[in-house]
Image (cartoon, rainbow, N blue to C red):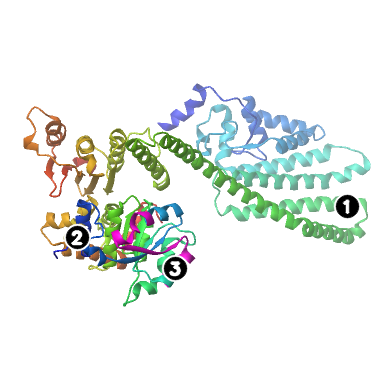
């Protein structure tokens, strides 16, 4: 692991510290094909300009879509590795895209992975796409470098939690008064809570690893476990939580 | 006692300009007499007696009553339209009679009906219109009673919009309408029969039925369409109003902000500050549940509110973005209030000295009785020991304040740069 730009979860943190790598030796190894789904053309253009310089960032934008139907068509045709998915879309929203691309997501050979990218603050939007199968959620205020990093992390099969999402999840999984339906799924372990808490406080994976004296890989596996629980668990707590906030 | 207060209130406060309404509470028939009594400040029984008296004078009272019923709108609770019906019992003694009726409307109505029938009988017996006209009297009374029933029904339908009416009244409503229609039909038929001979009754009825069916067939669809259109229009109007309210707020402030941004285009800091402020405002509007946090003037009463408010103010003042994540919530008490002040101080410090490194991150969590707040910046970081002892800012306003209130504060350098302030406080006992 002498090459800091090698694709793994830690790469992003290094990038953040230094100026973005310019056509370095390792850049060629990092390559990901991305489809942008967002109904605001201006935003697509902006993201494209920020991350789509393939020779610098390793991100190649192979398609764009502005609504659900277009998105499904483009994704099926181009088979990208990562889809940047807006939560609010004409034609049913990001959740609908996820539903119709379920087969592509489950593909064992070359799975298409989704990263939700939204301006929305509403918890039901966020939890909705995550439960729909998205591998992560970041807000549109994210910096270009962080976004590139998140894209690669998702490509690796990792989960990406923004501080806000971590907050939502902690909130939803907090106060387990009712006994969980499935002990394994419906409860976060102490470690997972700690990791989430640190994410919510704005720590990067590497910082979390240092703080908890664990490896970055372990942090990643904790986060992935939380994501799995979020997606799979039959959480009546989630429902209760949403009800308490008048979301349903 | 709240009741005493409400009873006294109408006397003390200046009344709004009085408008004549029919009373929907404790009325016998159309609420005309009660409404008039309230309007004129007379006991209702007097008004009723006057109406009965006028009724004897060739039915003038009935005509007058009908006119009032037709033209005067129905109000809730008589003249004091705002007064909820449940408070009828606290009214003054001049309305003593009404009150009794108000409590048992059904009995009162029956009494009123019986009275009316008796009065009508007496009237019919006394009146002498001479020869042929006399025969038409009974059918006319029948028609009048039917019309009264149906009008009363319309009043009820209108009143149901203000006051929740029980489900069981549905059948009663239907029954009443049917009875009204039957009465009117009987009356009209009577008139026809009197004009022709009884032998033609069958054909007259058939003709009447045919005309009725014809009218229903012709006008029915229009009527149905019209009522549908009306309710749809009402819905649209409500929606439009809501939209207009949001638009008025959002458009205005967004346009203002955009103008300011164009004017300050070369001042990056100011542009960022404006954009952040606008974003926050918009988010509050779009994503906050109804009735929370929309009013800037209110003092925050919960932890989440207070944290967000403080962050917003510091952000505005120092132009450094502050990202807030709150998990759980609890009401503010004295200790948490102190913690909020310390947190605010920490945010100010972070914005002032660590703002260049990026957004300041604020995290607040309520777990059981413990409230934890962390404020984190990505600036150069600082060492508490290296700060001269006379600089009391951090020691006093953050650490000192927390300790005086029974909490703890920790300041530490984050490994990769920046400072984190952790504030921990137990909630006061009574709020558990």
Q: Nearer the viewer, mark 2 or mark 1?
A: 2
Mark 1 crowd level (few <14, some 14–19, many ≥20, 10 Å Cα) = some
Q: Is residue A115 left or right of residue B69?
A: left
Mark 2 crowd level (few <14, some 14–19, many ≥20, 10 Å Cα) = some
The residue where tag 3 is placed is: A74
* Residue A42 higher or lower than B282, as above or below: below
Chain bearing tag 3 is A
Q: Quadrant of residue B340?
A: top left
Residue in the foreground of this view, choosing between B109 and B78: B78
* Rendering coords of residue B33 (x, y %): 67, 33
Q: Which residues are magenta?
A: A48-76
Chain bearing tag 1 is B
The verdict on residue A50 being magenta is: yes
**Any mark on residue B192, and which?**
1
Q: Residue at x 63, y 27 (%)?
A: B39
SS for callout 3: helix
Count of numbered badges drawn on the protein: 3
* Residue B150 higher or lower than A183, as above or below: above
Mark 3 crowd level (few <14, some 14–19, many ≥20, 10 Å Cα) = some
Task: Give the spatial CA distance, label 2 vs label 1.
Answer: 98 Å
SS for callout 2: loop
The residue where tag 2 is placed is: A10
Task: Give the spatial CA distance, label 1 vs label 3.
Answer: 78 Å
Q: Quadrant of residue B345?
A: top left
* Rendering coords of residue A248 (x, y %): 41, 56
The answer to whether residue B178 of the structure is visible from this angle is no
């Amino acid at each position: 692991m002498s090459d800091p730009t090698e694709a793994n979860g830690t790469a992003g943190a290094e990038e953040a510290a230094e100026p973005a790598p310019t056509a370095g030796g390792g850049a060629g190894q990092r390559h990901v094909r991305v489809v942008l789904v967002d109904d605001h053309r201006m935003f697509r253009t902006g993201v494209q300009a920020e991350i789509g310089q393939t020779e610098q960032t390793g991100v190649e934008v192979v398609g764009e879509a502005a609504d659900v139907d277009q998105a499904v068509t483009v994704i099926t045709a181009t088979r990208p590795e990562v889809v940047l998915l807006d939560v609010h879309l004409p034609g049913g929203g990001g959740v609908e895209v996820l539903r119709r691309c379920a087969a592509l997501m489950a593909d064992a050979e070359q799975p298409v992975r989704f990263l939700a990218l939204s301006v929305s603050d509403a918890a039901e939007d966020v939890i909705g796409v995550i439960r729909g199968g998205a591998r992560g959620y970041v807000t549109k205020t994210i910096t270009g470098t962080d976004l590139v990093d998140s894209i690669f992390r998702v490509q690796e099969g990792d989960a990406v939690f923004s501080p806000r999402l971590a907050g939502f999840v902690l909130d939803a999984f907090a106060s387990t008064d009712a006994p969980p339906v499935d002990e394994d799924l419906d409860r976060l372990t102490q470690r997972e809570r700690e990791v989430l808490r640190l994410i919510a406080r704005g720590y990067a994976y590497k910082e979390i690893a240092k703080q908890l004296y664990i490896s970055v890989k372990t942090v990643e596996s904790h986060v992935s476990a939380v994501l799995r629980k979020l997606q799979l668990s039959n959480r009546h707590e989630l429902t209760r939580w949403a009800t308490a906030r008048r979301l349903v | 006692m709240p009741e005493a207060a409400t009873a006294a209130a109408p006397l003390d406060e200046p009344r709004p300009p009085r408008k004549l309404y029919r009373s929907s509470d404790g009325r016998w028939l159309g609420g005309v007499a009660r409404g008039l009594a309230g309007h004129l400040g007379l006991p209702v029984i007097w008004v009723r007696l006057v109406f009965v008296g006028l009724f004897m004078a060739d039915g003038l009272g009935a005509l007058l009553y009908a006119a009032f019923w037709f033209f005067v709108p129905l109000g809730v609770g008589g003249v004091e339209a705002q007064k909820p019906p449940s408070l009828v019992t606290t009214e003054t003694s001049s309305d003593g009679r009404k009150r009794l009726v108000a409590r048992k409307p059904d009995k009162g109505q029956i009494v009123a009906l019986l009275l009316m029938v008796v009065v009508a009988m007496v009237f019919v017996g006394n009146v002498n219109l001479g020869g042929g006209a006399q025969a038409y009297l009974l059918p006319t009374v029948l028609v009048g009673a039917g019309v009264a029933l149906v009008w009363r029904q319309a009043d009820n339908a209108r009143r149901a919009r203000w006051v929740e009416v029980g489900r069981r009244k549905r059948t009663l409503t239907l029954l009443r309408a049917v009875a009204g229609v039957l009465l009117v039909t009987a009356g009209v038929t009577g008139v026809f029969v009197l004009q022709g001979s009884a032998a033609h009754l069958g054909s007259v009825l058939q003709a009447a039925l045919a005309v009725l069916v014809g009218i229903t067939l012709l006008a029915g669809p229009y009527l149905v369409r019209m009522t549908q259109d009306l309710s749809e229009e009402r819905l649209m109007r409500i929606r439009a109003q809501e939209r207009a309210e949001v638009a008025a707020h959002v458009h205005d402030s967004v346009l203002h902000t955009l103008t300011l941004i164009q004017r300050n285009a070369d001042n990056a800091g100011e542009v960022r500050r404006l954009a952040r402020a606008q974003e926050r405002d918009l988010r509050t509007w779009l994503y906050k549940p109804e009735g929370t946090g929309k009013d800037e003037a209110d003092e925050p009463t919960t932890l989440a509110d207070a944290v967000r408010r403080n962050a917003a103010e510091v952000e505005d003042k120092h132009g450094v973005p502050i990202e807030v994540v709150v998990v759980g919530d609890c009401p503010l008490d004295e200790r948490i209030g102190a913690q909020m002040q310390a947190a605010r101080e920490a945010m100010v410090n972070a914005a002032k000295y660590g703002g260049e490194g990026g957004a300041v991150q604020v995290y607040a969590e309520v777990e059981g009785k413990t409230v934890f707040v962390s404020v984190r910046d990505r600036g150069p970081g600082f060492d508490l020991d290296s700060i001269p002892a006379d600089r009391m800012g951090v020691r006093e306003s953050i650490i000192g304040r927390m300790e005086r209130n029974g909490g703890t504060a920790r300041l530490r350098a984050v490994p990769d740069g920046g400072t984190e302030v952790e504030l921990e406080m137990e909630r006061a006992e009574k709020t558990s």
